[in-house]
Amino acid sequence: MLIKRRRGWEIPEGRSTPESAWLDRRRLLKGLAAGPILAGAGVGLAGCMEEAEADQQAAAPVADPSTGLYPPKTNMRYRGERPMTTEELATTYNNFYEFGSHKNIWRASQVLPIRPWTVTFDGMVEAPKSVAIDDLLAAMGPLEERVYRHRCVEAWSMTVPWAGFPMRRLVEYAKPLGSAKYVTMQTFQNPEIASGQKQHWYPWPYVEGLTMAEATNELAFMATGIYGKPMPPQNGSPIRLVTPWKYGFKSVKSIVRFTFSDQRPVSFWEAIQASEYGFWANVNPGVAHPRWSQATEQPLGQSDRIPTLLYNGYTEYVADIYKGMNNERLFM
């Protein structure tokens, strides 16, 4: 497996590291590379830095026509309740296997063409349709900002302000049939641009799935922006899923298709290694990954590890979804 491990969050505001201390990106990466969690990960961040230095120079990003929609109004119901991760860290320390398996893929991902971009709705819907991303944004109504915690399966975490709209609104727009039980989301596929997709041992394109109950939960969010601006490619432009109670690999990026079905999908990482990555992937500190503990995590930009919380601290919003499912492998 190419998954690598990092660290954790949930600390008082007074113990947060000042933003100015983390603006030197190389200093941060070297600090993380020295952390104990990287020792067992197989590939250190120092190596990732060297690998990233060899990346091709990124093309200038195409102007995003949705810029006028930002910054949206903040929804104060969702405030994160932890120190905010700096934009510098959240936009340069990323997973996006389409562009490489290291954490420094932000350079390579700048070549992703975000316009034109078409999103398709098919499967068990009243009528299949494809829509340009800007028409979809117009149909979704005003965007809003939500500050959510993000917990990676690798045991690092962050707290960021996502901009977008509730996934429930998108489901209503798609008009699925009453018999639909799941929605599968698919990332773009273009190996000429995304060099990682030339690695044929991966089951491209990247797909993820949710139950209809999860997709229509109030926390499920379609993000199109971050830090008051349109989403940069490395974070999943132009549209990605955010499910803050689940491990980060569930939050599929750069989505081009939503397919509704009565059959549970097999997601990307589940197809690669089902013994380590299940369909549900809900955060639980009491259930370890087969190769490392999930009890604590390392917030980006923080020096101390902190305890991981059940459902990433969102139990009150989502626990009812999973009642009576004792036979399901809900965590990991």
Image (tube, rainbow, N blue to C red):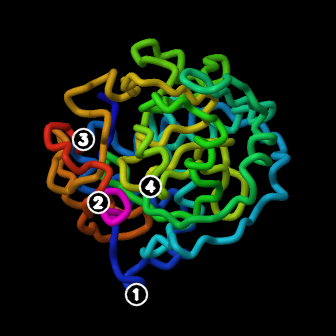
| Labelled disc at residue 14 | 1
In front: 30, or 282? 282
State the CA–CA distance, disc 3 to disc 2: 15 Å
The residue pinned by badge 2 equals: 297
Circle 4 Cα neighbour tier, 10 Å, few/some/many (<14 / 14–19 / ≥20)? many
Disc 1 marks a residue whose amino acid type is Gly
Q: Which residues are magenta?
A: 313-319
Circle 3 Cα neighbour tier, 10 Å, few/some/many (<14 / 14–19 / ≥20)? many
In front: label 3 or label 2: 3
Q: Earlier in the sequence, mark 3 or mark 2?
A: 2
Does the segment drawn in magenta span residue 315? yes
Does the segment drawn in magenta span residue 280? no
In front: label 4 or label 3: 3
State the CA–CA distance, disc 1 to disc 2: 19 Å
Q: Earlier in the sequence, mark 1 or mark 2?
A: 1
- Vertical arrangement, residue 14 with respect to residue 208, above or below: below
In front: label 4 or label 2: 2
Q: Earlier in the sequence, mark 4 or mark 2?
A: 4
Mark 2, secondary structure of its residue: strand
Q: Quarter of the image holding residue 142? A: bottom right
Q: Quarter of the image holding residue 181? A: top left
The answer to whether the residue labelled 1 contacts the one labelled 2, judged by CB atoms less than 8 Å apart, is: no
Disc 4 marks a residue whose amino acid type is Leu
Disc 3 marks a residue whose amino acid type is Met
Mark 4, secondary structure of its residue: helix
In front: label 3 or label 1: 3
State the CA–CA distance, disc 3 to disc 1: 32 Å
The residue pinned by badge 3 equals: 332
